[in-house]
Structure formats: structure tokens, C-alpha cells
Image: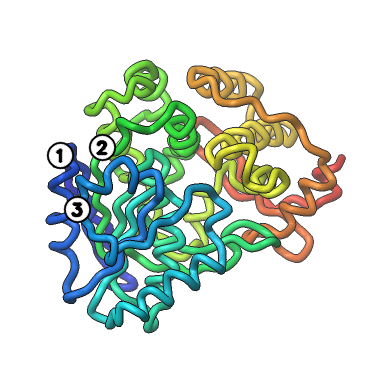
Amino acid sequence: MISLSVNISEAQKSYPINIEWDSISSMREKILSYVQGKKFLVVISEKVEKLYGKELGFTKEEKFILKDGEKQKNFKNYEKILNLALKMQLTRKDAIIAIGGGVVGDLAGFAASTYMRGIDFIQVPTTLLACVDSSVGGKTGIDTKFGKNLVGVFYQPKAVLINTNFLKTLDERQLKTGLGEVVKYAFIEKSCMNNEEFNLTNFISENCEKILNKDNLTLSSLIQMCIKLKISVVEKDEKENGLRRILNFGHTYGHAIEQITGYKKFTHGEAVVEGIHFAFNLAVKKNLIDKNYKYFADDVMKKFNFRAIPQFPLNKIIELMKMDKKATSDKIVFILPTDYSIVKAFEISEEELIS
């Protein structure tokens, strides 16, 4: 087992992150060791329930089964979870447990943060994307018709319990959507201000085949590196007042793609990869980097054969990007590369984008 921890000294918050590869049947006991009260509600993805429900051993009365897909991260399901928690008479000492991908974690975390003004929340990520990114750092929320994650709070979990055996049943597309976030970390590594140097771009390039074949040790190392980079950022800037903005590399354009296609056509990771391509092209046009670095980045991403995304009308994309949480009244904030594995935030006007 690999044990890490997040320590946010300013807010006096800390919690463990465990990465292991024991049998999934052992997970129930480990999860419940972090539940202080007598009761808990498990919010579990429908796919995970079908694959691992019996092994996990939670009863029907203890579970809320969430259908799969970004569209499920909505007010209606949020209300259903709260109503079930109230029906179960959960108290402030009890817990909500998320078992699934990023959608489950975001929604269950938001419910936990607002139920009785906040009860314990335990993350059990079962997708690569959730393991390397969304389960760590305390971002919770839901989507609205106006955009993605526009309603939510920062609410740190009590623990994050990762078991790489869940990843064995990920299909190729879901594995690659997680790799979209992994690639993001490779291109922002030096800006994360971590005291270890991983050279993540080299690691993913050299171990591409092992990663795609879901080699347990390789995935465990990959998850550990990405989490360490995220911890480094979150500990310095919990609520995205400065440094944490770099974690949105590729996301401003990526979220617009997800919204314009109704969250149905492309996965989050696919959209983020397209957002990274957009950011590199924009950086070249602004003379922030030379074309050789862009070509290098393209080569790294080509190794994983991410799904191609067509271009959309720029005026429609701009309108959606203006609704981004990071946007100001007249500028859109982009995280752009400025050197090898280094990025910075830039405010760019609509006129500059069009020109």
C-alpha cells in the first residue's frame, strides 16, 4: 500500500490517501473504519454496483445507485440523495461515501457538504480520472443548464481510498479519459511546485504500452505521481485563489466542448485533451512558446490515440467560455504553456481570440 496525505495548514485540515491493490472484498471494512457514527449512505455508480456490488457487500438500504454519465450530476439527484439521508436519519456524526467516478464523487461530496451544514465524506474512486484528479482536493458540485460545475463548494473528504483493481474493468475509452488528466499533469508539472521531479512526460511516453495494458504497478506509480502534484498545489492554494488555477489547463475550452455537445458526445478527458491542443496553439500564436514544444506535446498525446474532436463555431464556444467560473466581466482566463512543463494564467479578450 502507498500512503499519502493532504495537509492544508491554513484551514487545519488533513486526510489520508491510500493507494492499494488488495481484493475489492476487503474494501468495505477499510471504508467503514473511517466512519465515526453509526450510519452512512453509500452513493455508488450503477456500473460499479453491477460489477462489484456483491464484493463490496453494502445492503440495498445503505445505497443510492446513480446512473452513469455527466448528465446525472444535477439538482434532481442532489435532492434525492439529501432526501434519502434525511429518511435514514443521518446525523452530523454520520457519513456519505462515494464509490465511483468523478460524477459520483462531485455529487456525493456536494450533498455531504450541505447536509446538516456538512458531514463526513469518504471518496472511493473507481476510474483513472477520479483516482488521479477529481477525488483529491475537495472540489464538489453539480452542473446546470448554464454550464459545468457552476454550483458547488470546496469540501475536503475525510479519506480517499484508491484500489487499482477497480481499473481492471475500465473500458479503453474510460481509461483514456483518465489519461486526458494525466497528460494535463505532465504539461504543468514544474508549475505545481512539488519538491520531487518526476519528468512525467517521459514516464508516460516510455510506459505508454504498460499504461494502456493497465499494468498494476505502472498505474499505481502513475496515480501516485499525479496525486503528489495535485497535493502540492492544493496545500498551497485550497480554494483556487492563485496557484490552483493551473489545474484548469485545457479545461476552459474543454468544458465548452462538453456543454456544446450536451455532455453526450465526448468524455471529459477527451474534451480536456482538445482543450490542451487549443492552449498550445494559442500559446504559439501569442509567441509564448516555439513550435517545437508544440510538436513535442502533440507527439506525447498522439501516443494514446485520443479521439479526434471537430472544430466548433468559435463564436458559440466563446459564449460558453465566458460563463466559465474563472472568467472576468470582459476577459476569459486561459492557462497557457510558457515553457517545458510550465504554465501561467492569461486573461484574453473576446476580440483577441477572434483575431
Amino acid type at mark 3: Gly
Q: Which mark is residue 164?
A: 2
* Image position of 318 (left or right of 33): right
Mark 1 and mark 2 in contact? Answer it, CB < 8 Å: no
Q: Earlier in the sequence, mark 3 or mark 1?
A: 1
Q: In x, y percent, where is residue 181?
A: 47, 39
Please determine whether, in this image, residue 126 is positioned above or below residue 105.
Answer: above
Residue 202 falls in image quadrant: top left
User: How has the structure been colored for display?
Assistant: rainbow
Q: For the point 32% across and 25% down, which residue is it?
A: 214
Q: For the point 60% across and 50% down, which residue is it?
A: 345
Q: Residues within 10 Å of mark 2 (few under 14, many from 20)?
A: many
Q: CA distance from mark 1 to mark 2?
A: 10 Å
Q: Is residue 187 visible?
A: no
Residue 343 falls in image quadrant: top right
Q: Which residue is mark 3?
A: 57
Mark 1, secondary structure of its residue? loop
Callout in the foreground (3, 1): 3
Q: For the point 59% across and 46% down, which residue is it?
A: 251
Q: Which residue is mark 1?
A: 23
